[in-house]
Amino acid sequence: MTRATSPAAPIRRRAAPPGAGRGGRCAGWWQDSPHPGALTEYIAMEDAASRVRTWQLSLVPGLFQTPEYARALAVGEGVGPWEDPAEIERVVDIRMRRQNRLTGERPLKVYAVVWEAALRQLIGGSATMRGQLERLLEIAELENVRLQVLPFHVGGHPCVTGPFTILSFNEDEAVDVVQADTIASSVWVENEAASSAYSDLFDRTARRSLAQRDSIQLIEAIRQEI
């Protein structure tokens, strides 16, 4: 099943978080989030997931962002809808709390493929971006993280149409769930055949990307250029 949902629409799925109530929602630390409903639901799904595969065209994945980078996105560079300083700080805090899954007793396995453009776009200015690239270099050292960069020189690639994230779960018979954002809504792909198609797109793009060691070298080179 593929469905486009408005931020307020409930989403039902087989791979719902443990303890999820009607509509696949579940109480948790993210309930205080100022994010639109669909993004809050994504955070709940991410918290229940055992593995995340994400393809990003223009932004650093949220799980890897520094507070300064996240704040720059929220403040008003055309990405975030927030104006209240207190609300902006809540947005940043939620993003940082999501990153707790990268370490601890049940670390989330994350496989991220990022287009080179996301590393060169000066979100928040030079200093913020240098700090963000340094953070990527640190995160790439985690055993549960795999980070690859798709360089410009590759040219066309299978995932040119837009970013998406594939969430996998440990529950028996749970299918992978795919989330992709459009301008007006979030699209959730919730059946095995369709999610497998996204997995294939991700794998094909990853094969065209730099190996992690070479990706780290490129990130460091861009950091020194900024």
Image (cartoon, rainbow, N blue to C red):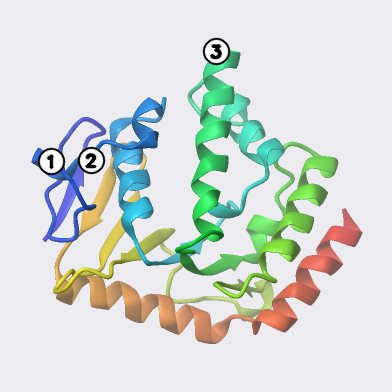
Residue shown at 63%/48% (left/top)? Answer: 65
Q: Please identify the residue farthest to the front as the structure is shown.
A: 105
Residue shown at 21%/30% (left/top)? Answer: 8
Percent from the top left, x then y, of residue 21? 13, 40
Q: Nearer the viewer, residue 134 or 201?
A: 134
Query: Could you tell me which secondary element the residue under label 3 belongs to?
Result: loop
Residue shown at 73%/55% (left/top)? Answer: 135
Q: Is residue 128 left or right of residue 69?
A: right
What residue is disc 1 on? 21
Q: Please identify the residue farthest to the right as the structure is shown.
A: 224
Residue shown at 49%/55% (left/top)? Answer: 101
Q: Nearer the viewer, mark 2 or mark 3?
A: 2
What residue is disc 3 on? 84
Percent from the top left, x then y, of residue 116? 66, 65
* Residue type, numbered disc 3: Asp
Earlier residue among tags 2 and 1: 1
Q: Is residue 62 visible?
A: no
Q: Is residue 131 left or right of residue 203?
A: right
* Residue type, numbered disc 2: Cys
Q: Nearer the viewer, residue 31 or 3?
A: 31
Q: Is residue 172 positioned above or below 11 on the image?
A: below
Percent from the top left, x then y, of residue 164? 39, 60
Q: CA distance from mark 2 to mark 3?
A: 27 Å
Please say if the residues under marks 2 and 1 sit with CB atoms less than 8 Å apart.
yes
Q: How dense is the environment of label 1, judged by Cα within 10 Å: few (below 14), some, or many (20 and up)?
A: few
* Mark seen at residue 26: 2
Image quadrant where one finds the N terminus: bottom left
Please say if the residues under marks 2 and 3 sit with CB atoms less than 8 Å apart.
no
Q: Is residue 159 left or right of residue 74?
A: left
Query: Could you tell me which secondary element the residue under label 2 belongs to?
Result: loop
Percent from the top left, x then y, of residue 64? 60, 54
